[in-house]
Image (cartoon, rainbow, N blue to C red):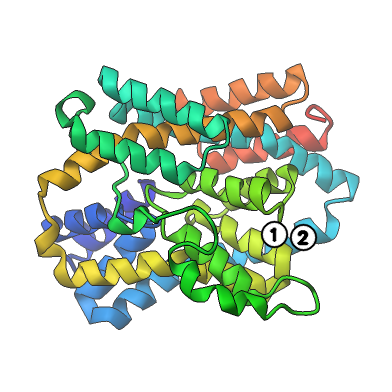
Amino acid sequence: MAIIALMERELVRKRRVIEPDEFIHGVGLGQLLGPFAVNTALFVGYRLCGTLGGLVSASAFVAPSLLLVLVLSWIYFSYHAIPALQGAVAGLGPVVIALILNAAWSMGKKAVKTWAAALLFALATAASLFRINPIYALVGAGILGLTLPAQVGGVNHSPPDTPEAKPPGNNQESGACALLWPFSLLATAGGLSLSHLFVTFFTMGLIFFGGGFVLIPVLHHTLVVRLAWLSPQEFIDGVAISNLTPGPISVLATFAGYRLRGISGALVATTALYLPAVMVMILLCREYERFKGRKATQAFLSGIAPAVIGLVLSTAIVLASGTLHSWRAFAFTAIALLLLIRWRLNPALVLGLGAIAGSIGILP
């Protein structure tokens, strides 16, 4: 949202290249699927210069973060065994937990306002802790939102959904993967093919709505729990590295792709994750007038919103269980959360404090 504010200041008030109401429409449509700041950049570029302008704007927005994650991933996987760097990375873990809890708190204040919303929040949290696929929790919550719109509270405060967010199953072979799975058989000598990597991240991109923190449970379930492509520690370190960049936290896909297949894997994973959102956003840019103010959409979103918060909270709980091994780690998590909520300190500064604490041995 901070980046959205900067966009509004630069594009609407300063340069006046887009009307205020059109910009608001872009922000709203951008929340349907994928990282909404990237989608908003695509929307503005499309309104100014068509499809090519949208693609250029979105790519330029993501490029700095992608390049930075590539550099940080190379450093991490090359040197993280060195005690100094390993200590710094260890100090980032508690801050990552605090960042996720802060996101859950911020979104929860807006989304969980009724007893029905609180119930959906609790059910989604429990479902995720029992390792039920997040897709089922979100789709079920959306259906309940359609059934009980008044009780849940049909106010569009939170991450929306799209028809693509309801695939028939959670396996890699479901949905788009049913069409693409033969290509994953083209395995390389290293074991994992780029086509397999593409299929996996493209599938996750189909249910990537609500921003990067909402994607974390899906990535964790797929990459750590189901496929074991990343260890729990590598995953949380990847979240920390993604938070060090100025762009969307979804560049965690770049980190994971680099871990699996180097630079080519990083580019394939990032492209595959964003591709569904780009396709949907371009379509919406062409037809967005048709999608404003539908009551059924608002009701579905009202159910998904509290479930999303539950998934985010559950991820913080799961990651904390494998990361916070001492009272000092718990204390630093609480301090970091206080700095983020009470004093609204920049996350990069809090991550820097964590790295320093880890480097000097406060957080082993």
Residue 303 image position (x, y, % from top left) = 28, 35
> Crowding near pointer 2: few (<14 within 10 Å), some, many (20+)?
few
- The residue that disc 2 covers is 75
The answer to whether any part of residue 64 appears in the image is: no
Instruction: Give the image quarter of residue 258.
Output: bottom right
Position of 155 with respect to 198 (left or right) is left
Q: Quadrant of residue 157?
A: top left
3D distance between C-alphas at marks 1 and 2: 5 Å
Q: Nearer the viewer, residue 237 or 14?
A: 237
Query: Which type of secondary structure does the marked residue at label 1 adopt?
Result: helix
Task: Tell me the tag on residue 355.
Answer: none
Label ID, residue 72: 1
Horizontally, residue 192 falls left or right of residue 11, namely right
At label 1, the amino acid type is Leu
Instruction: Residue 124: name its quadrant.
Output: top left
Residue occupying image coordinates x 35% and y 38%: 140
Name the residue type under label 2. Ile
Residue drawn at the location 31% of the way across and 74% of the way down: 54
Mark 2: secondary structure: helix
Q: Nearer the viewer, residue 196 or 358?
A: 196
Q: Position of residue 251 (x, y in %)?
A: 55, 58
Please rate how many residues cluster around mark 1, counting C-alpha atoms within 10 Å: few if below 14, some from 14 to 19, many from 20: some
Q: Position of residue 284 (x, y in %)?
A: 22, 66
Tell me whether the residue at label 1 lies in contact with that at label 2, contact meaning CB atoms closer than 8 angstroms: yes
